[in-house]
């Protein structure tokens, strides 16, 4: 006979968990000392505990584990449960593989952004811009991509010529981020085709980085810019500018990122 401590050591699960299994009727002691209340188990119950743990790791509930171990399930029902569990595991593996692919993409994107930031970072004044644009507001950074895509589609439909510019402005109270997509125009151009006209003032001290690569890597380059500025005791603020230099190939866009900077408090 094995004491509860012996069984715990053989199966590598806690005494507390064995007591829990006893209370549920899953692993009942072979004998309980009527005077001390100590539990004693048969050697064969090591197999039962190991099988119970294996079934749990497959994702079955304790109730299902008990029914399987006690052979209370018809063979066809057990086969059905195992097939369902197989399908769930395959779905999880596919989802995990997709997440791993995204993690690897983000790592490559950040490494590319760091390289480009270190190579192309320039500090100096930024010129004034006049934009004809469409705008939207979003709640946080995760919504920027969707807003830019929707605004870009509307602007594309207008078939206007000119350099594409995106801007982002986080409101000081943190409530919203204003996003705009437009084209840079001359100082005398006025609103057309239902677009708003906005003048972005010149910035005496700014930073710019040139990004070249897949469009989805632009966001990571903004983050690496902040890291590079922090190392120089600077921070970005105000209206962030995204000047699209070349977008003919979505796999190899060329964008200049611009932001006003100031000493970190």
Image (cartoon, rainbow, N blue to C red):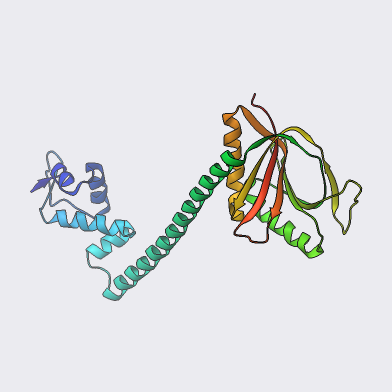
**Vertical relation: 52 (above or below) 15:** below
- Residue 77: x and y in percent read 32, 73
| Residue sitting at x 15%, y 47% | 10
In the rendered image, the residue lying farthest to the front is 119
Which quadrant of the view contains residue 14? top left
In the rendered image, the residue lying farthest to the left is 1
Examine the rendering and report whether any part of residue 177 can be seen. no
| Residue sitting at x 54%, y 42% | 114
Examine the rendering and report whether any part of residue 19 can be seen. yes
Q: Is residue 171 left or right of residue 109?
A: right
- Residue 68: x and y in percent read 26, 65
| Residue sitting at x 30%, y 72% | 79
- Residue 64: x and y in percent read 31, 62
Of 5 and 212, the residue lying toward us: 212
Number of callouts in the render?
0
Which quadrant of the view contains residue 123? top right
**Vertical relation: 32 (above or below) 149:** above
Q: Is residue 58 left or right of residue 202?
A: left
Give the position of the C terminus as an image quadrant.
top right
Q: Is residue 222 left or right of residue 28?
A: right
Q: Is residue 7 left or right of residue 225?
A: left
Of 146 and 63, the residue lying toward us: 146
In the rendered image, the residue lying farthest to the top is 265
| Residue sitting at x 64%, y 61% | 249
**Vertical relation: 264 (above or below) 98:** above
- Residue 186: x and y in percent read 87, 49
Of 144 and 250, the residue lying toward us: 250
């Amino acid at each position: 006979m094995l004491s509860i401590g012996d069984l715990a050591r053989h199966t590598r699960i806690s005494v507390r968990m064995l007591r829990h299994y006893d209370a549920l009727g899953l692993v009942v002691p072979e004998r309980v000392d009527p005077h001390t209340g100590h539990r004693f188990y048969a050697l064969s119950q090591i197999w039962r505990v190991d099988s119970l743990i294996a079934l749990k790791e497959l994702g079955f509930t304790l109730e299902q584990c008990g029914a399987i171990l006690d052979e209370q399930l018809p063979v066809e029902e057990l086969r059905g449960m195992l097939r369902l569990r197989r399908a769930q595991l395959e779905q999880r593996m596919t989802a995990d593989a997709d997440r791993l692919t995204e993690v690897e993409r983000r790592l490559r994107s950040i490494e590319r952004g760091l390289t480009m930031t270190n190579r192309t970072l320039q500090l100096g004044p930024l010129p004034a811009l006049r934009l004809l644009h469409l705008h939207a507001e979003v709640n946080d950074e995760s919504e920027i991509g969707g807003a830019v895509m929707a605004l870009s589609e509307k602007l594309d439909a207008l078939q206007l010529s000119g350099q594409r510019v995106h801007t982002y402005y986080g409101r000081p109270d943190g409530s919203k981020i204003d996003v705009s997509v437009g084209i840079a125009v001359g100082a005398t151009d006025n609103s057309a085709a239902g677009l708003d006209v906005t003048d972005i003032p010149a910035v005496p001290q700014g930073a710019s980085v040139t990004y070249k690569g897949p469009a989805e890597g632009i966001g990571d380059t903004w983050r690496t810019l902040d890291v590079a500025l922090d190392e120089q005791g600077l921070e970005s603020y105000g209206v962030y500018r995204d000047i699209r230099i070349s977008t003919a190939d979505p796999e190899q866009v060329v964008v200049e990122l611009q932001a006003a900077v100031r000493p970190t408090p």
